[in-house]
Amino acid sequence: MPAKKRKSAEVRRHDVVEAAMEIIRHEGVAKLTTRSLSQAVGIAQPTLFLHFGSKSHVLVALIDTIQERLQQEMAGLGLARLPPLERLKAVIRAHLNFIQRQPGIPRLLFSEELQSGDPVFRARMNGLVQFFLGFIADLIAAAQAEGEIRPEIVPQQNACILIAAVQGLAFRWVLSDNRFELSEQADAVIATFIDGWAARP
């Protein structure tokens, strides 16, 4: 029989990151260990350490993957074709859809590991949050420049409030064991926040 072809280091790292997301999705961050990861991927723990030195390194790679996918999601929306306020609405709908397709993200956000765990992981997660906050703030500012959002709305501050509302919905969704469609909450978020920011005639 021919020898089984070995996977490249890049493919193996991808497998580990995907396995980590699945473990977090179903069991939470606390159940993510080098043992559970090596078993899920089908490799020995020493082999896992060749690709990732620790659980913290796996979590950082996971955050990098989430940011890459989020950027791809936003790039695929065709935002340049939309008026600024419609861009903001499209991003909120897409963001809630994104979270619903990857349920491990809310568990990661609200994990004990993030609150009191490795500072490198916490800093990387903060970097992801800041990236998205900046993206939303820029959309708000662009809508203000077109006169679609009132000038007294502070972009960075209100971007924080908007993302906090989305995270709160995601947390309730996790607690309910995904018993409602997270993406269907987009219109309520838009009506409460974005439409409320709109310039008055």
Image (spheres, rainbow, N blue to C red):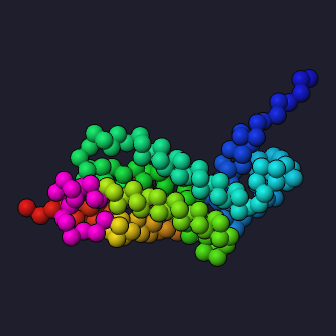
Quick one: which residue is furthest to the front in this view? 145
Q: Is residue 138 visible?
A: yes
Give the quadrant of residue 103.
bottom right
Q: Is residue 150 magenta?
A: yes
In the drawing, does residue 11 fall left or right of residue 192? right
Give the quadrant of residue 113.
bottom right
Image height check: is 84 above or below 152?
above
Q: Quadrant of the C terminus?
A: bottom left
Residue 47 at x, y = what percent? 85, 49
Image height check: is 42 above or below 181?
above
Residue 65 at x, y = what percent? 59, 50
Give the mark count.
Answer: 0
Q: Quadrant of the N terminus?
A: top right
Quick one: which residue is furthest to the left in this view? 201
Residue 129 at x, y = what percent? 49, 63
**Residue at x 29% of width, y 59% of height:** 140
Give the quadrant of residue 9.
top right
Quick one: which residue is furthest to the right in this view? 1
**Residue at x 37% of width, y 42% of height:** 77
**Residue at x 65% of width, y 54% of height:** 61
Residue 134 at x, y = what percent? 40, 60
In the drawing, does residue 113 fall left or right of residue 105? right
**Residue at x 41% of width, y 62% of height:** 133
Q: Is residue 39 visible?
A: no
Q: Is residue 113 magenta?
A: no
Which portion, as a residue range, is magenta?
Answer: 140-155
Instruction: Please name whichever residue, 200 or 169, is drawn nearer the observer in this view of the structure.
Output: 200
